[in-house]
Amino acid sequence: MKVPVALTIAGSDSGGGAGIQADLKTFAALGVHGTCAITAVTAQNTLYVRDIISIPPEIVMAQIDVVADDIEVDAAKTGMLHDPEIIELVRSEQNEHGFPLVVDPVIWAGSGDRLVTPAAEKKIVKSLIPISQVVTPNITEASVIADTLINSVKDMEEAARGIATLGSEVVVVKGGHLEATGDTIVDVMFHGGEITHFKKPKMEEPGTHGSGCSFAAAIAAYIAKGFESVEAVFHAEKFIDVAVGNPVMIGGGRKPVNPIFWLEIDAERWRVLNDLDEAVKRIESTNNFGEFIPEVRTNVGMALPTAKSVDDVAAVDGRIMNYHGQAKPLGRIRFGASSHIARIILAIMEHDPSMRAVINIKYSEEIIKACNELGLIVSTFDRSKEPEEVKKQEGKSLPWGVNIAIASIGRVPDIIFDRGGIGKEAMVRILAPSAKEAVEKAVKIIQKMKKK
Protein backbone atom coordinates (compact mmCIF):
# COMPACT_ATOMS: atom_id res chain seq x y z
CA MET A 1 0.00 0.00 0.00
CA LYS A 2 1.40 3.38 -1.03
CA VAL A 3 2.24 5.79 1.76
CA PRO A 4 0.88 9.30 1.03
CA VAL A 5 3.65 11.90 0.86
CA ALA A 6 3.47 15.66 1.31
CA LEU A 7 6.20 18.26 0.85
CA THR A 8 6.48 21.52 2.78
CA ILE A 9 8.47 24.32 1.20
CA ALA A 10 8.81 26.78 4.05
CA GLY A 11 10.96 28.41 6.68
CA SER A 12 12.25 26.93 9.93
CA ASP A 13 10.96 28.21 13.28
CA SER A 14 13.58 27.85 16.02
CA GLY A 15 10.78 27.91 18.60
CA GLY A 16 9.18 24.83 17.04
CA GLY A 17 5.71 26.33 16.83
CA ALA A 18 5.31 27.36 13.18
CA GLY A 19 6.95 26.84 9.80
CA ILE A 20 8.21 23.43 8.75
CA GLN A 21 8.07 22.25 12.36
CA ALA A 22 4.28 22.78 12.50
CA ASP A 23 3.90 21.36 8.98
CA LEU A 24 5.77 18.12 9.67
CA LYS A 25 3.85 17.57 12.91
CA THR A 26 0.61 18.08 11.00
CA PHE A 27 1.59 15.63 8.26
CA ALA A 28 2.52 13.03 10.88
CA ALA A 29 -0.72 13.51 12.84
CA LEU A 30 -2.73 12.88 9.67
CA GLY A 31 -0.84 9.76 8.64
CA VAL A 32 1.15 11.38 5.83
CA HIS A 33 4.90 11.08 5.38
CA GLY A 34 6.37 14.57 5.51
CA THR A 35 9.27 15.83 3.43
CA CYS A 36 10.66 19.36 3.38
CA ALA A 37 12.61 22.01 1.55
CA ILE A 38 13.80 24.70 3.95
CA THR A 39 13.64 28.19 2.40
CA ALA A 40 14.83 30.26 5.35
CA VAL A 41 16.02 29.90 8.91
CA THR A 42 14.42 32.20 11.47
CA ALA A 43 15.54 33.02 14.99
CA GLN A 44 12.18 33.32 16.72
CA ASN A 45 10.17 32.30 19.76
CA THR A 46 6.54 32.74 20.83
CA LEU A 47 7.08 36.50 21.28
CA TYR A 48 8.97 37.79 18.25
CA VAL A 49 11.23 37.12 15.26
CA ARG A 50 14.80 38.20 15.98
CA ASP A 51 16.48 37.37 12.68
CA ILE A 52 15.99 35.70 9.29
CA ILE A 53 18.46 34.27 6.82
CA SER A 54 17.41 32.95 3.42
CA ILE A 55 18.67 29.64 2.09
CA PRO A 56 20.36 30.02 -1.34
CA PRO A 57 17.91 29.26 -4.19
CA GLU A 58 20.11 26.49 -5.58
CA ILE A 59 19.95 24.67 -2.22
CA VAL A 60 16.15 25.05 -2.06
CA MET A 61 15.92 23.66 -5.58
CA ALA A 62 18.23 20.78 -4.70
CA GLN A 63 16.05 19.88 -1.71
CA ILE A 64 12.90 19.75 -3.85
CA ASP A 65 14.55 17.88 -6.71
CA VAL A 66 16.24 15.24 -4.58
CA VAL A 67 12.97 14.47 -2.82
CA ALA A 68 10.83 14.44 -5.98
CA ASP A 69 13.36 12.33 -7.92
CA ASP A 70 13.17 9.52 -5.38
CA ILE A 71 9.82 9.89 -3.62
CA GLU A 72 6.49 10.50 -5.32
CA VAL A 73 5.13 13.73 -3.83
CA ASP A 74 1.32 13.63 -3.67
CA ALA A 75 0.89 17.26 -2.61
CA ALA A 76 2.98 20.22 -1.50
CA LYS A 77 2.42 23.40 0.44
CA THR A 78 4.36 26.62 0.68
CA GLY A 79 4.95 28.79 3.70
CA MET A 80 7.55 31.49 4.16
CA LEU A 81 9.18 32.32 0.82
CA HIS A 82 11.44 35.23 1.72
CA ASP A 83 12.82 36.29 -1.69
CA PRO A 84 11.42 36.64 -5.24
CA GLU A 85 14.05 34.19 -6.54
CA ILE A 86 12.76 31.47 -4.23
CA ILE A 87 9.18 32.06 -5.37
CA GLU A 88 10.10 31.83 -9.04
CA LEU A 89 12.07 28.67 -8.27
CA VAL A 90 9.03 27.09 -6.57
CA ARG A 91 6.90 27.94 -9.58
CA SER A 92 9.45 26.24 -11.86
CA GLU A 93 9.71 23.17 -9.62
CA GLN A 94 5.93 22.77 -9.44
CA ASN A 95 5.73 22.96 -13.21
CA GLU A 96 8.46 20.33 -13.55
CA HIS A 97 7.18 17.83 -10.97
CA GLY A 98 3.45 18.53 -11.25
CA PHE A 99 2.46 18.14 -7.59
CA PRO A 100 -0.78 19.81 -6.39
CA LEU A 101 0.15 22.99 -4.53
CA VAL A 102 -1.41 24.63 -1.46
CA VAL A 103 -0.17 28.18 -0.97
CA ASP A 104 -0.12 29.81 2.43
CA PRO A 105 0.86 33.33 1.33
CA VAL A 106 2.89 34.17 4.41
CA ILE A 107 3.71 37.87 4.58
CA TRP A 108 3.72 38.66 8.29
CA ALA A 109 4.22 36.57 11.41
CA GLY A 110 1.44 36.61 13.97
CA SER A 111 3.73 38.74 16.14
CA GLY A 112 3.54 41.45 13.45
CA ASP A 113 7.07 40.91 12.12
CA ARG A 114 7.37 41.05 8.34
CA LEU A 115 8.59 37.73 6.92
CA VAL A 116 8.96 38.52 3.19
CA THR A 117 10.31 41.42 1.16
CA PRO A 118 7.87 43.73 -0.68
CA ALA A 119 9.20 42.33 -3.97
CA ALA A 120 8.47 38.78 -2.80
CA GLU A 121 4.98 39.85 -1.78
CA LYS A 122 4.25 40.95 -5.37
CA LYS A 123 5.80 37.77 -6.75
CA ILE A 124 3.51 35.58 -4.61
CA VAL A 125 0.51 37.30 -6.18
CA LYS A 126 1.83 37.19 -9.74
CA SER A 127 3.62 33.83 -9.92
CA LEU A 128 2.50 31.53 -7.11
CA ILE A 129 -1.22 31.96 -6.50
CA PRO A 130 -2.08 31.34 -10.20
CA ILE A 131 -0.59 27.81 -10.01
CA SER A 132 -2.09 26.93 -6.63
CA GLN A 133 -4.87 24.43 -6.09
CA VAL A 134 -5.77 26.08 -2.75
CA VAL A 135 -4.66 29.42 -1.31
CA THR A 136 -5.19 30.30 2.37
CA PRO A 137 -4.59 33.99 3.19
CA ASN A 138 -5.61 35.56 6.50
CA ILE A 139 -7.57 38.82 6.27
CA THR A 140 -4.41 40.99 6.28
CA GLU A 141 -2.84 38.98 3.47
CA ALA A 142 -6.14 38.81 1.58
CA SER A 143 -6.40 42.62 1.80
CA VAL A 144 -2.98 42.95 0.16
CA ILE A 145 -3.58 40.30 -2.50
CA ALA A 146 -7.08 41.53 -3.44
CA ASP A 147 -6.09 45.19 -2.95
CA THR A 148 -9.11 45.92 -0.76
CA LEU A 149 -9.99 46.74 2.83
CA ILE A 150 -11.58 43.92 4.84
CA ASN A 151 -13.81 44.96 7.73
CA SER A 152 -16.63 42.43 7.49
CA VAL A 153 -17.50 38.91 6.39
CA LYS A 154 -18.98 40.45 3.24
CA ASP A 155 -15.60 42.04 2.53
CA MET A 156 -13.97 38.62 3.03
CA GLU A 157 -16.32 37.13 0.44
CA GLU A 158 -15.48 39.82 -2.09
CA ALA A 159 -11.75 39.42 -1.44
CA ALA A 160 -12.03 35.66 -1.94
CA ARG A 161 -13.80 36.19 -5.28
CA GLY A 162 -11.10 38.65 -6.32
CA ILE A 163 -8.26 36.31 -5.38
CA ALA A 164 -9.93 33.46 -7.27
CA THR A 165 -9.60 35.46 -10.49
CA LEU A 166 -5.83 35.05 -10.18
CA GLY A 167 -6.24 31.35 -10.95
CA SER A 168 -6.47 29.38 -7.70
CA GLU A 169 -9.09 26.63 -7.69
CA VAL A 170 -10.11 27.20 -4.04
CA VAL A 171 -9.65 30.32 -1.91
CA VAL A 172 -10.00 30.24 1.88
CA VAL A 173 -9.85 33.62 3.63
CA LYS A 174 -9.18 33.05 7.34
CA GLY A 175 -11.08 35.40 9.63
CA GLY A 176 -9.36 34.87 12.96
CA HIS A 177 -8.31 38.53 13.22
CA LEU A 178 -11.64 40.05 12.15
CA GLU A 179 -13.13 41.90 15.13
CA ALA A 180 -16.49 42.55 13.45
CA THR A 181 -17.65 38.97 14.09
CA GLY A 182 -17.50 39.35 17.90
CA ASP A 183 -17.28 36.02 19.71
CA THR A 184 -17.34 34.04 16.45
CA ILE A 185 -14.59 33.30 13.96
CA VAL A 186 -15.64 32.94 10.34
CA ASP A 187 -13.48 31.47 7.57
CA VAL A 188 -14.76 32.07 4.04
CA MET A 189 -14.20 29.58 1.21
CA PHE A 190 -14.84 30.43 -2.43
CA HIS A 191 -14.98 27.62 -5.00
CA GLY A 192 -16.77 27.30 -8.31
CA GLY A 193 -18.78 30.45 -7.76
CA GLU A 194 -20.03 29.25 -4.36
CA ILE A 195 -19.33 30.75 -0.93
CA THR A 196 -19.03 28.55 2.18
CA HIS A 197 -18.71 29.84 5.76
CA PHE A 198 -16.91 27.94 8.50
CA LYS A 199 -18.05 29.32 11.85
CA LYS A 200 -16.48 28.57 15.22
CA PRO A 201 -16.45 30.23 18.66
CA LYS A 202 -13.46 32.31 19.70
CA MET A 203 -11.39 30.64 22.40
CA GLU A 204 -9.97 32.24 25.53
CA GLU A 205 -6.42 31.02 24.95
CA PRO A 206 -6.12 29.39 21.53
CA GLY A 207 -2.95 28.02 19.95
CA THR A 208 -2.55 30.70 17.30
CA HIS A 209 1.22 30.46 16.75
CA GLY A 210 1.64 28.30 13.65
CA SER A 211 -2.10 27.86 13.07
CA GLY A 212 -1.93 29.18 9.50
CA CYS A 213 0.98 26.87 8.70
CA SER A 214 -0.78 23.86 10.21
CA PHE A 215 -4.07 24.61 8.44
CA ALA A 216 -2.45 24.78 4.99
CA ALA A 217 -0.39 21.68 5.81
CA ALA A 218 -3.57 19.82 6.78
CA ILE A 219 -5.17 20.70 3.44
CA ALA A 220 -2.07 19.43 1.63
CA ALA A 221 -2.09 16.26 3.74
CA TYR A 222 -5.70 15.47 2.85
CA ILE A 223 -5.03 16.13 -0.83
CA ALA A 224 -2.04 13.79 -0.58
CA LYS A 225 -4.43 11.18 0.83
CA GLY A 226 -6.63 11.47 -2.25
CA PHE A 227 -9.30 13.98 -1.21
CA GLU A 228 -10.56 16.62 -3.61
CA SER A 229 -9.59 20.21 -2.75
CA VAL A 230 -12.92 21.31 -1.26
CA GLU A 231 -13.27 18.11 0.75
CA ALA A 232 -9.70 18.58 1.98
CA VAL A 233 -10.60 22.05 3.24
CA PHE A 234 -13.62 20.72 5.16
CA HIS A 235 -11.47 18.08 6.86
CA ALA A 236 -8.67 20.57 7.54
CA GLU A 237 -11.12 22.97 9.23
CA LYS A 238 -12.07 20.25 11.72
CA PHE A 239 -8.44 19.34 12.26
CA ILE A 240 -7.30 22.89 12.93
CA ASP A 241 -10.13 23.51 15.40
CA VAL A 242 -8.75 20.67 17.52
CA ALA A 243 -5.13 21.73 17.11
CA VAL A 244 -5.85 25.37 17.95
CA GLY A 245 -8.18 24.49 20.83
CA ASN A 246 -5.54 22.41 22.61
CA PRO A 247 -2.39 24.54 22.45
CA VAL A 248 1.10 23.69 23.66
CA MET A 249 1.41 25.69 26.88
CA ILE A 250 4.95 27.04 26.49
CA GLY A 251 6.59 30.46 26.21
CA GLY A 252 5.50 33.93 27.19
CA GLY A 253 3.77 34.88 23.94
CA ARG A 254 1.24 33.28 21.60
CA LYS A 255 0.83 29.59 22.38
CA PRO A 256 1.82 27.19 19.58
CA VAL A 257 -0.79 25.16 17.75
CA ASN A 258 -0.81 21.48 18.74
CA PRO A 259 -1.29 19.19 15.70
CA ILE A 260 -0.34 16.07 17.68
CA PHE A 261 -3.44 16.42 19.86
CA TRP A 262 -5.39 15.03 16.88
CA LEU A 263 -3.82 11.64 17.63
CA GLU A 264 -4.57 11.99 21.33
CA ILE A 265 -8.31 12.27 20.65
CA ASP A 266 -8.61 8.72 19.33
CA ALA A 267 -6.47 7.43 22.18
CA GLU A 268 -8.60 9.28 24.72
CA ARG A 269 -11.85 8.04 23.16
CA TRP A 270 -10.57 4.49 23.58
CA ARG A 271 -9.65 5.21 27.21
CA VAL A 272 -13.13 6.58 27.93
CA LEU A 273 -14.90 3.63 26.29
CA ASN A 274 -12.65 1.14 28.06
CA ASP A 275 -13.21 2.83 31.42
CA LEU A 276 -16.98 2.78 30.88
CA ASP A 277 -16.92 -0.86 29.82
CA GLU A 278 -15.19 -1.83 33.07
CA ALA A 279 -17.57 0.38 35.06
CA VAL A 280 -20.64 -1.26 33.53
CA LYS A 281 -19.22 -4.73 34.21
CA ARG A 282 -18.72 -3.69 37.85
CA ILE A 283 -22.37 -2.59 38.02
CA GLU A 284 -23.58 -5.90 36.55
CA SER A 285 -21.46 -7.95 38.96
CA THR A 286 -22.62 -6.10 42.09
CA ASN A 287 -25.38 -8.02 43.81
CA ASN A 288 -28.68 -6.17 44.19
CA PHE A 289 -27.40 -3.06 42.38
CA GLY A 290 -30.73 -3.11 40.54
CA GLU A 291 -32.54 -2.25 43.77
CA PHE A 292 -30.90 1.18 43.67
CA ILE A 293 -31.92 1.92 40.08
CA PRO A 294 -34.65 4.60 39.82
CA GLU A 295 -37.83 4.29 37.76
CA VAL A 296 -36.28 6.31 34.93
CA ARG A 297 -33.36 3.83 35.01
CA THR A 298 -29.68 4.43 35.64
CA ASN A 299 -26.94 5.61 33.35
CA VAL A 300 -23.25 6.15 33.73
CA GLY A 301 -21.35 8.53 31.48
CA MET A 302 -17.86 9.85 30.99
CA ALA A 303 -16.55 12.75 28.91
CA LEU A 304 -13.42 13.37 26.91
CA PRO A 305 -11.02 15.80 28.64
CA THR A 306 -11.83 18.43 25.99
CA ALA A 307 -15.60 17.77 25.92
CA LYS A 308 -17.67 20.60 24.52
CA SER A 309 -20.84 18.85 23.31
CA VAL A 310 -23.07 15.81 23.85
CA ASP A 311 -21.08 13.91 21.22
CA ASP A 312 -17.99 14.19 23.43
CA VAL A 313 -19.64 12.23 26.25
CA ALA A 314 -20.08 8.44 26.20
CA ALA A 315 -22.81 6.56 28.06
CA VAL A 316 -24.98 3.43 27.84
CA ASP A 317 -27.47 3.46 25.00
CA GLY A 318 -30.95 2.94 26.48
CA ARG A 319 -29.65 3.18 30.05
CA ILE A 320 -29.39 0.40 32.68
CA MET A 321 -32.52 -1.31 34.04
CA ASN A 322 -33.43 -3.25 37.17
CA TYR A 323 -34.08 -6.91 36.36
CA HIS A 324 -35.10 -8.81 39.50
CA GLY A 325 -32.63 -6.86 41.59
CA GLN A 326 -29.76 -7.10 39.12
CA ALA A 327 -28.56 -4.33 36.84
CA LYS A 328 -28.82 -4.97 33.08
CA PRO A 329 -27.60 -2.55 30.42
CA LEU A 330 -30.05 -2.23 27.53
CA GLY A 331 -27.62 -1.14 24.85
CA ARG A 332 -24.01 -0.61 23.95
CA ILE A 333 -21.66 2.07 25.20
CA ARG A 334 -21.17 4.88 22.70
CA PHE A 335 -20.50 8.59 22.43
CA GLY A 336 -23.64 10.73 22.18
CA ALA A 337 -25.83 8.02 23.74
CA SER A 338 -27.33 10.26 26.45
CA SER A 339 -27.92 13.99 26.16
CA HIS A 340 -29.32 13.86 29.70
CA ILE A 341 -26.15 12.57 31.38
CA ALA A 342 -23.96 14.60 29.01
CA ARG A 343 -25.52 17.92 30.03
CA ILE A 344 -24.86 17.14 33.69
CA ILE A 345 -21.21 16.27 33.04
CA LEU A 346 -20.60 19.27 30.78
CA ALA A 347 -22.04 21.60 33.45
CA ILE A 348 -19.81 20.03 36.11
CA MET A 349 -16.70 20.29 33.92
CA GLU A 350 -17.20 24.04 33.59
CA HIS A 351 -16.32 24.19 37.31
CA ASP A 352 -13.80 21.34 37.47
CA PRO A 353 -12.60 19.81 34.17
CA SER A 354 -11.16 16.81 36.02
CA MET A 355 -14.64 15.67 37.15
CA ARG A 356 -15.66 13.92 33.95
CA ALA A 357 -18.05 11.15 35.04
CA VAL A 358 -21.50 10.74 36.60
CA ILE A 359 -23.79 7.86 37.57
CA ASN A 360 -27.33 8.33 38.87
CA ILE A 361 -29.08 6.13 41.45
CA LYS A 362 -32.45 6.44 43.16
CA TYR A 363 -32.98 8.88 46.02
CA SER A 364 -33.80 8.17 49.66
CA GLU A 365 -32.95 9.94 52.89
CA GLU A 366 -31.15 6.75 53.97
CA ILE A 367 -28.90 6.92 50.92
CA ILE A 368 -27.99 10.55 51.63
CA LYS A 369 -27.26 9.60 55.26
CA ALA A 370 -24.98 6.79 54.04
CA CYS A 371 -23.16 9.24 51.77
CA ASN A 372 -22.51 11.55 54.71
CA GLU A 373 -21.33 8.65 56.88
CA LEU A 374 -18.87 7.65 54.16
CA GLY A 375 -17.40 11.15 54.26
CA LEU A 376 -18.62 12.06 50.78
CA ILE A 377 -19.23 15.74 50.08
CA VAL A 378 -22.95 16.24 49.43
CA SER A 379 -24.88 19.13 47.91
CA THR A 380 -28.40 19.63 46.62
CA PHE A 381 -30.76 21.89 44.69
CA ASP A 382 -34.50 22.54 44.98
CA ARG A 383 -36.46 22.06 41.77
CA SER A 384 -39.32 24.21 43.11
CA LYS A 385 -37.01 27.23 42.90
CA GLU A 386 -36.16 26.72 39.23
CA PRO A 387 -36.84 29.96 37.30
CA GLU A 388 -39.58 29.87 34.66
CA GLU A 389 -37.18 31.02 31.94
CA VAL A 390 -34.98 27.98 32.68
CA LYS A 391 -37.95 25.57 32.64
CA LYS A 392 -38.94 26.83 29.20
CA GLN A 393 -35.55 25.98 27.67
CA GLU A 394 -35.05 22.35 26.70
CA GLY A 395 -32.07 20.78 28.48
CA LYS A 396 -31.38 23.72 30.82
CA SER A 397 -32.92 22.40 34.06
CA LEU A 398 -30.16 20.01 35.11
CA PRO A 399 -27.25 22.36 34.30
CA TRP A 400 -29.10 25.00 36.36
CA GLY A 401 -29.45 22.54 39.25
CA VAL A 402 -25.81 21.49 39.03
CA ASN A 403 -24.65 25.11 39.10
CA ILE A 404 -26.85 25.87 42.13
CA ALA A 405 -25.57 22.80 44.01
CA ILE A 406 -21.93 23.70 43.31
CA ALA A 407 -22.37 27.39 44.12
CA SER A 408 -24.06 26.60 47.45
CA ILE A 409 -20.92 24.90 48.83
CA GLY A 410 -18.29 26.65 46.73
CA ARG A 411 -16.87 23.49 45.14
CA VAL A 412 -17.72 20.41 43.07
CA PRO A 413 -19.06 17.74 45.47
CA ASP A 414 -19.11 13.95 45.31
CA ILE A 415 -22.91 13.86 45.39
CA ILE A 416 -25.60 16.14 43.96
CA PHE A 417 -29.19 15.17 44.79
CA ASP A 418 -32.66 16.63 44.49
CA ARG A 419 -35.98 15.60 45.98
CA GLY A 420 -37.84 15.81 42.69
CA GLY A 421 -40.77 17.89 41.57
CA ILE A 422 -43.88 17.74 39.42
CA GLY A 423 -43.18 15.04 36.86
CA LYS A 424 -39.58 14.78 38.02
CA GLU A 425 -38.28 11.79 39.99
CA ALA A 426 -36.02 12.45 42.97
CA MET A 427 -32.43 11.50 42.14
CA VAL A 428 -28.92 11.06 43.49
CA ARG A 429 -26.02 11.78 41.15
CA ILE A 430 -22.54 10.54 41.97
CA LEU A 431 -19.61 12.51 40.53
CA ALA A 432 -16.02 11.39 39.92
CA PRO A 433 -13.03 11.87 37.58
CA SER A 434 -13.78 8.54 35.84
CA ALA A 435 -16.71 6.18 35.33
CA LYS A 436 -14.98 3.44 37.32
CA GLU A 437 -14.47 5.79 40.26
CA ALA A 438 -18.10 6.96 40.10
CA VAL A 439 -19.31 3.35 40.13
CA GLU A 440 -16.99 2.46 43.02
CA LYS A 441 -18.54 5.28 45.04
CA ALA A 442 -21.98 3.89 44.19
CA VAL A 443 -20.94 0.38 45.24
CA LYS A 444 -19.63 1.68 48.58
CA ILE A 445 -22.94 3.45 49.19
CA ILE A 446 -24.84 0.23 48.36
CA GLN A 447 -22.62 -1.83 50.65
CA LYS A 448 -23.10 0.74 53.43
CA MET A 449 -26.86 0.47 52.99
CA LYS A 450 -26.78 -3.36 53.14
CA LYS A 451 -25.02 -3.28 56.50
CA LYS A 452 -27.84 -1.31 58.08
Image (spheres, grey):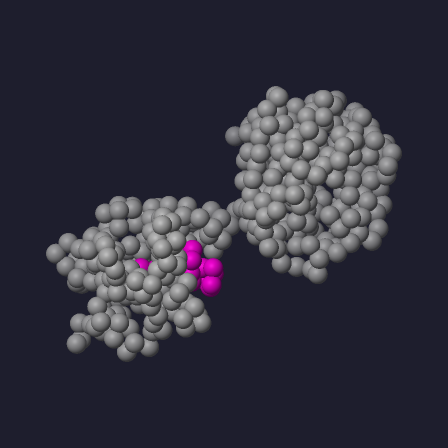
On screen, residue 402 versus residue 320, left or right, reads right
Does residue 348 belong to the magenta stretch? Answer: yes
Residue 58 vs 436, above or below: the answer is above
**Over which residues does the magenta segment extend?**
344-359
* Residue at image location 65% in from the left, 40% down from the top: 175
User: Which residue occupies the extreme left position in the image?
Assistant: 324
* Residue at image location 74% in from the left, 23% down from the top: 166
Q: For this rendering, which residue is in front, 254 or 261?
A: 254
* Quadrant in which the C terminus is drawn: bottom left
Q: Position of residue 180 (x, y in %)?
A: 65, 43
Residue 410 placement: quadrant: bottom left
Q: For this rendering, which residue is in front, 333 or 362?
A: 362
Does residue 4 belong to the magenta stretch? Answer: no
Q: Position of residue 292 (x, y in %)?
A: 20, 62
* Residue at image location 73% in from the left, 34% down from the top: 142
Q: Where is residue 49 in the image (x, y as percent from the top left)?
A: 80, 52
